Amino acid sequence: MTEETLHSEHAPPAAAVEEDLAVALERWAGAAPPLSRQLVELAMQDNARQRRVALWELLADLERPERTRLMTEILGASYREENEGLRLLFSFLCGRPVSFLYAELITKLHHTRRFHRKLAAGKVDRSEEETRWLERLLAVLPDLATASRPLELLDAASARLHAVLSLENEMPFPFEETVAALVKLEGEAASLRGQRLVERIGDYDPRGPARILPMVIALDEWQGDLHDFADRGPTSLKHPLRQFLGEEETVGWKHALKKDGGAPARLLSRWIGWMEETEMLGNEPAGWVAILKALDDRRYRRTLLAALVLPMRWRDRRLGLKRKPPEELFPRRAVSMADGYYWVDLDQLLWSAWVSADGIPASPEFWLREESPLLMLRSRIQDEAFCNRILDNSQWTGRPGVVEAIARGSRSLKILLRIARTRKFYTGSANRGVPVALLANPVGIPLSALRPFLSPRFITRHDLAHLARGGPDVREEISREAREVLRHM
């Protein structure tokens, strides 16, 4: 069966080809190279979007043989289920191709409409960030402040956006100031709505994050997409292959991979052909691989093999499974049968429910694990507005480890000072580790704010001794103060 037949709209997945793929992968994987230090450091980037961009920029700077070697290292690490390799693999796969549906979604101003209605009604307290968003919206559409029918004004703004963004290849760029501002405001409205969703998690219940946190991730991704679109216009709708490598180099690399007889090159070639033709948003491929791993034949429990099978199990945004998916996870309308497979309509699912906080495949049970809220928090630890939302919610700050994670990982002086100066954030059993986390944070928190914590009342003698010894992870003035305290104990 040829590669073309595999991707035919009417051809079912080929079991024999899948089996051959598994065998070839097993033969090659034993000699797979380790990840280079450069790739390990890139994989440690917590922000999924920044990690994706950094990887594609690195690929674009390399000659073809080096680019293929780098991807071979990622394939090997992914086969061994190393977290760094998996993060990079899905950073590579999770790009965006040209999609005019994408522009259609923007022009509806769905999030702007809903958020404006909520804030303008005056029935909710606004954060500073929400107030600034509303002020910027009124600066772009000043008549909204006094309009008796604000929906009509927003309909007119949507129609204007539609006229500009639906011109396909003739989309004018740079956008006029009003158009760019509306696009960015729509993205920010999505992210701010996500932050409000976080507040709706009441008493700690793992089912709360299971329902809400995937949506928060998706809304945050949408904000980044729209800011990128406003700044770069139609070029941001290209798949990273063409966006970063350019048309000529993309074609050249594809030809080089097809000529290469090695297993890694054949695997990459198979992916690239599928990636360019497939409509994707966010980390959808990671979600689809998670579905294959969780619900299909046991042999696809290996992440890399499930990822390689994905193009063969794909048909018009449907995924073919050998087993009937459970109804408690998949609504009946999402599943149909054809060619001996259960086809799942992926647009009926929330893909982000199958993706972990760092952008790699996860089963739905991931969100039921106790640590999942902390994993989510760590993935957005540098988002000052998000951290403020968490600190505002006593149900979150009363959860052991939450404030400590912010105190240890945040690099926002404003956030750290808020924790250091608010008694409830550093007292009680849930926040026992907060004082040490603040003292160990490399940000230049004023010593006057930290000095009260250098006391046996807040930290153990062992922790004081560690701080007193100093080292690259402890500020010199903290070490000096800790030594002084120990001298008088």
Image: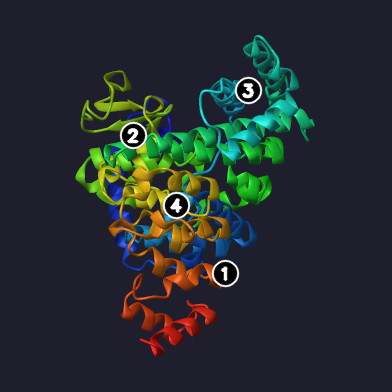
Identify the mark nearer the N-term, 4 or 2. Answer: 2
In this view, the residue farthest toward the front is 488
Quarter of the figure with the N terminus: top left
Q: CA distance from mark 1 to mark 3?
A: 47 Å
Q: CA distance from mark 4 to mark 1?
A: 26 Å
Which amino acid type is shown beneath numbered disc 2?
Arg
Q: Position of residue 250 (x, y in %)?
A: 61, 48
Q: CA distance from mark 2 to mark 3?
A: 27 Å
At 70% from the left and 36% from the top, the residue drawn is 233
Identify the mark nearer the N-term, 2 or 3. Answer: 3
Q: Residue 379: which numbered mark, if any?
A: 4
In this view, the residue in front, 421 or 274, is 421
In this view, the residue in front, 126 or 408, is 126
Which amino acid type is shown beneath numbered disc 1?
Pro
Task: Classify 10 Å Cα crowding around label 2: few (below 14), some (14-19), many (20 and above).
Answer: some
Asked whether residue 321 appears in the rendered view, the answer is yes
Residue beneath label 2, please?
A: 211
Identify the mark nearer the N-term, 4 or 1. Answer: 4
Residue beneath label 1, please?
A: 446
Asked whether residue 170 appears in the rendered view, the answer is no
Q: Position of residue 254 (x, y in %)?
A: 56, 49
Secondary structure state at the residue bearing disc 4: helix
